[in-house]
């Protein structure tokens, strides 16, 4: 770890001066939209640098600032900005450096709203894009045009866990003067240090493991001081998708247990995967830290571990079979999202009506019998017993 060790970051960084709060161990929630000044000179200073002063909570807030410091340090970045959602963080990072006529290269299976941002939203403003199979760095290189300003990565992605060689893509981009943005939600900063690999901007859906308690929607963007300032002056302040002080406080609390949660979840996940791979009614299992994954070597090279999100197919290859299995599960909550304390189930292909918005499933990108589960903090025995009884119904 860089300057501070992990427990210092989680327990102390940004909170050192407790004397300001009469020794309070848990930091106060600065539930204030505005901050007042004693003198015109002080106010002038704050106007001159809203990123690092407290003036108005759309820009900066002391509770949110604690979280900024912690997340930047976790990623090994100079600074970070907190957003009201992961989608807002990604949109701000993507839009900051783009103008009409520019071109973006993106992985072929990004998070669905990242796909929409490029395909449906930015296309209307004259920004071009190409979605490429970025497991092969050469495919990225081949898709670059003289107008390409940004490469959007997501490694691993969250249905099929495809990865990109981050150091190689970052080196290629730097040679061409192209910016890189990585969605690092799956790996978390504990398992993948993308800034150190040369990535310019690292985004997270903090809704997932970083907060970890299924009670806050939040996003974060990490990068150099100059890039974060550019994002701040641009989409951050103009679009105003900031995180509230109260949600920041909840996330400070959730973040403190990130390493313990991840360690426990990764352990349970290994046991669950071993069970699934042996089960006759389970087809393929997708997990980036499994020796059977085609990119396992890359996993070992650029990540230090994996978490608790995995996918598998239920034999039978029909939506009806998947439905029977999912309806029978008792201990996995059927819902979207992942990364919480509780185990979750998302029957991705089965829930999208075939004639609604274009989805990963409709684009033929995930098999119709694919189920994604997010392992929580329950005992492995409990989860395996539940999976076993549900597979018996198939
Ligand atoms: C959930 C998710 C997002 C979007 O984050 P929100 O907090 O829901 O806006 C982005 N990327 C990935 C990989 C996600 O799983």
Image (cartoon, helix red, strand yellow):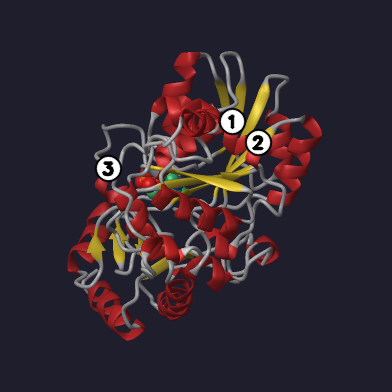
Circle 3 SS class: loop
Residue 156 located left or right of residue 313: right
User: In the image, which is nearer the foreground, mark 2 or mark 3?
Assistant: 2
Q: Residue at x 58, y 65 (%)?
A: 191
Classify the position of the C terminus by image quarter.
bottom left
In this rendering, which labeled residue sits more in front, label 1 or label 3?
Answer: 1
Whole-percent x, y for residue 332 in the image: 25, 68
Question: Residues under labels 2 and 1: Cα distance?
Answer: 6 Å
Q: Quadrant of residue 176?
A: top right
Q: Are marks 2 and 3 in contact (CB under 8 Å)?
A: no
x and y percentages locating residue 277 in the rendered image: 45, 75
CB of mark 2 near ligand 1 (< 8 Å): no
Which disc is residue 352 wearing? 3
Q: Residues within 10 Å of mark 1 (few under 14, many from 20)?
A: some
Q: Earlier in the sequence, mark 2 or mark 3?
A: 2
Residue 67 in the figure: left or right of residue 140: left
Looking at the image, which residue sits at the far front? 39
Q: CA distance from mark 1 to mark 3?
A: 38 Å
* In the rendered image, the vertical position of residue 262 relative to residue 246, given as above or below: below
The crowd level at tag 3 (other Cα within 10 Å; few <14, some 14-19, many 20+) is some
- Which residue bears the numbered disc 2? 226
Vertically, is 239 above or below 68? above
User: Which residue is depicted at the point 42% across and 37% down?
Assistant: 38
Q: What secondary structure is marked by label 1? A: helix
Q: Would you name the residue on which mark 1 appears?
A: 230
Circles 2, 1 touching at the beta carbon (< 8 Å): yes
Percent coordinates x, y for residue 75 in the rendering:
59, 56
Instruction: Please name whichever residue, 41 or 26, is drawn nearer the observer in this view of the structure.
Output: 41
């Amino acid at each position: 770890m860089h300057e501070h060790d992990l427990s210092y970051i989680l327990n102390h960084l940004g909170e050192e001066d407790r004397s300001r709060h009469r020794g309070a161990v848990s930091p106060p929630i600065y539930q204030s939209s505005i901050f007042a000044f004693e003198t015109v000179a002080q106010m002038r200073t704050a106007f001159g640098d809203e990123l690092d002063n407290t003036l108005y909570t759309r820009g900066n807030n002391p509770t949110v600032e604690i979280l900024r410091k912690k997340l930047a340090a976790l990623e090994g970045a100079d600074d970070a900005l907190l957003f009201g959602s992961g989608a807002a963080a990604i949109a701000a990072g993507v839009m900051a450096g783009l103008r009409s006529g520019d071109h973006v290269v993106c992985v072929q299976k990004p998070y669905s709203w990242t796909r929409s941002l490029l395909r449906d939203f930015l296309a209307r403003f004259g920004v071009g894009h190409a979605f490429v199979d970025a497991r092969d760095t050469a495919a990225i290189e081949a898709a670059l045009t003289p107008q390409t300003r940004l490469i959007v990565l997501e490694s691993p992605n969250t249905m099929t866990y495809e990865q990109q060689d981050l150091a190689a893509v970052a080196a290629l981009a730097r040679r061409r003067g192209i910016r890189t943005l990585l969605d690092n939600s799956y790996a978390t900063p504990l398992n993948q240090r993308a800034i150190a690999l040369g990535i310019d901007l690292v985004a997270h859906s903090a809704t997932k493991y970083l907060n970890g308690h299924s009670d806050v929607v939040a996003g974060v963007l990490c990068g150099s001081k100059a890039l974060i300032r550019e994002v701040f002056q641009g989409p951050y302040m103009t679009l105003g998708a900031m995180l509230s002080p109260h949600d920041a406080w909840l996330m400070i609390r959730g973040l403190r247990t990130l390493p313990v949660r991840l360690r426990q979840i990764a352990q349970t996940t290994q046991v669950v995967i071993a069970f699934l791979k042996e089960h006759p009614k389970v087809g393929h299992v997708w997990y980036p830290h499994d020796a059977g994954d085609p990119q396992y070597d890359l996993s070992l090279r650029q990540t230090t571990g994996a978490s608790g999100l995995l996918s598998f197919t239920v034999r039978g290859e029909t939506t009806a079979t998947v439905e029977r299995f999912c309806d029978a599960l008792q201990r996995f909550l059927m819902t979207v999202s992942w990364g919480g304390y509780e185990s979750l189930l998302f029957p991705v292909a089965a829930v999208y009506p075939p004639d609604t918005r274009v989805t990963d499933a409709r684009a033929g990108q995930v098999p119709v019998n694919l189920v994604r589960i997010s392992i929580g903090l329950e005992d492995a025995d409990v989860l395996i017993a539940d999976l076993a009884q549900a597979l018996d119904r198939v």
